[in-house]
Amino acid sequence: MTNKLLSFLFGAAVSLVAAGAASAGTLDEVRQRDAVLCGVSTGLPGFSVPDSQNNWTGMDVDFCRAVAAAVLGDASKVKFTPLSAKERFTALQSGDIDILSRNTTWTMSRDTSSGLKFAGIMYYDGQGFMINKTKLPNVKSAMDLAGATVCTQSGTTTELNLADFFSSNNMEYKLVTYEKNDDALAAYQDGRCDAYSTDQSGLYAQRLKFTNPDDHIVLPEIISKEPLGPVVRQGDDAWFNIVKWTYFALVNAEELGITSQNVEQIKTTSKDPQVKRLLGVPGEDGTSAGFGTGIGLEESWAENAIKAVGNYGEIFERNVGANSPLKIARGKNALWSDGGLQYAPPVR
C-alpha cells in the first residue's frame, strides 16, 4: 500500500470519527452529563497543573471553567483529563473530551486535516531554548548551540521547529526526544543534553521546578510562532461557536472594564450599549437582543463566565502574569488597544 493511499485512508478515518463524535451534538451531551470534559496538560505551571488534592489551576483550566459557567451556570462542573502531547488529539477526535485546552499550537495541518478546529488564541507564544549557565558559561545565544544536544518532547511542533532553525543556520545538532515532558526535563537536568527547548512560556514555567532556577537561563531568540488556544472537533459548529465566543467574551470584558468583581454592579448601572449586549441586559421593551439564545445558551452566559473566572486580563495576571510566580509580561498578549494582539470581534 502506498504512502499516499495510507495518508488518504487515515485522513478519511479521522474525519469519520470526528463527524460521528459531533453528530449527537456536544452541547446536548454536556447538558445530559452536567459536566464539560476538558483535556489539559499533565502539568505545566501557569497553564494547567494539579495540586496534591487534584485541584487544577492555570490559564487553560480557567478557560474550561469559563465554558462550564457559560453553558451550565457553574464553573465547577468540569472534569479534567491530563493528556500527553501524543494522546491529546486522539482523545478529542474520539469524543473522550469536549475541549482540548492544553498549550496546543494552531497550525495549518492541525486545522485542516486532523478533524480539529481552533477556537481562538489564548496565548501568543514562541519556541526558545534554556541552558544551564554554570555548565555552558560561554553560551549567550541560540547561535552558540552548534553541535549541541537538545532535549524536547516528542509529538509536538517543537521537533519540526528545531529542524528548521538548525538547518536554516547551517548548524549541526543532536535531537533527543521523550514522550513525556517530565522525562525530557529530567534528561536536561541530568546533563544528558546541552539545552532544553519548548515554548518560552513553558521554559519559564518548567524553570520554577528546579532546585536552583537561577542557574538556568532562557536564551533571547524566539525561533517560531506558537499561537496557543483551545481546540474542538470539526463538524459541530454549535459547540465551536460556544467555545469561540466564550473566549471572545473574556477579551471583550477586559476591554470594557468588566471584571469578576464588578460584573453584577456594571450590569445594572452601565449605559454602554456594548456592555448591555455582552451581559444580556434587556432593552426598554423588556426583551434582550438574544445573543445568548443565538448560541443556544441563557442570556447570562457571558456574565456567568466573567463572574466565575474574570476577564482575560484577570486570568492572565493571576496565572502567568504579575500576580503569579512566573511574572510574564503581557507583551503580545496585551489588548490591541495597549499594543498587543488580543482582539475580539464585537457582540452585536
Image (tube, grey):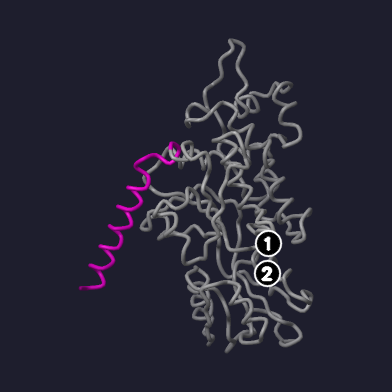
Q: Residue at x 64, y 48 (%)?
A: 62
**Circle 1: element type:** loop
Front-most of residues 169 and 273: 273
Residue at the left extreme of this rendering: 1
Q: Work out whether mark 1 precedes mark 2 in sequence or the reverse, and give the earlier one.
A: 1
State the quadrant of the N terminus.
bottom left
Q: Secondary structure at mark 2?
A: helix
Residue 345, image x and y in percent? 55, 38
Question: Which residue type does callout 1 highlight?
Answer: Pro
Q: Residues within 10 Å of mark 1 (few under 14, many from 20)?
A: many
Q: Residues within 10 Å of mark 2 (few under 14, many from 20)?
A: many
Asked if residue 11 is among those painted magenta in the image, a careful observer would answer: yes
Task: Find residue 327 and report its horizontal and vertical position in percent.
Answer: 76, 59
Q: Is residue 247 left or right of residue 9?
A: right
Distance, label 1 to label 2, CA atoms, is 7 Å
For the residues bearing labels 1 and 2, Cβ distance under 8 angstroms? yes
Inspect the image, locate mark 2, and give the three-letter code of the amino acid beneath it.
Answer: Gln
What residue is rendered at 38% in x and 58% in y? 114
Specify the principal SS of the magenta part.
Answer: helix
Residue stretch rendered in magenta on the structure: 1-28
In this rendering, would 6 be left or right of 155? left
Residue 40 in which image quadrant: bottom right
Tell me if 336 is positioned left or right of 21 in this view.
right
Q: Which residue is mark 2?
A: 206
Residue furthest top as drawn: 285
Q: Is residue 325 above or below residue 34?
A: below
Task: Name the residue that disc number 1 marks.
Answer: 45
Residue 121 within the segment the image draws in magenta = no
- The answer to which of 340 and 152 lies nearer the viewer is 152
When asked about the image quadrant of residue 125, the answer is bottom right
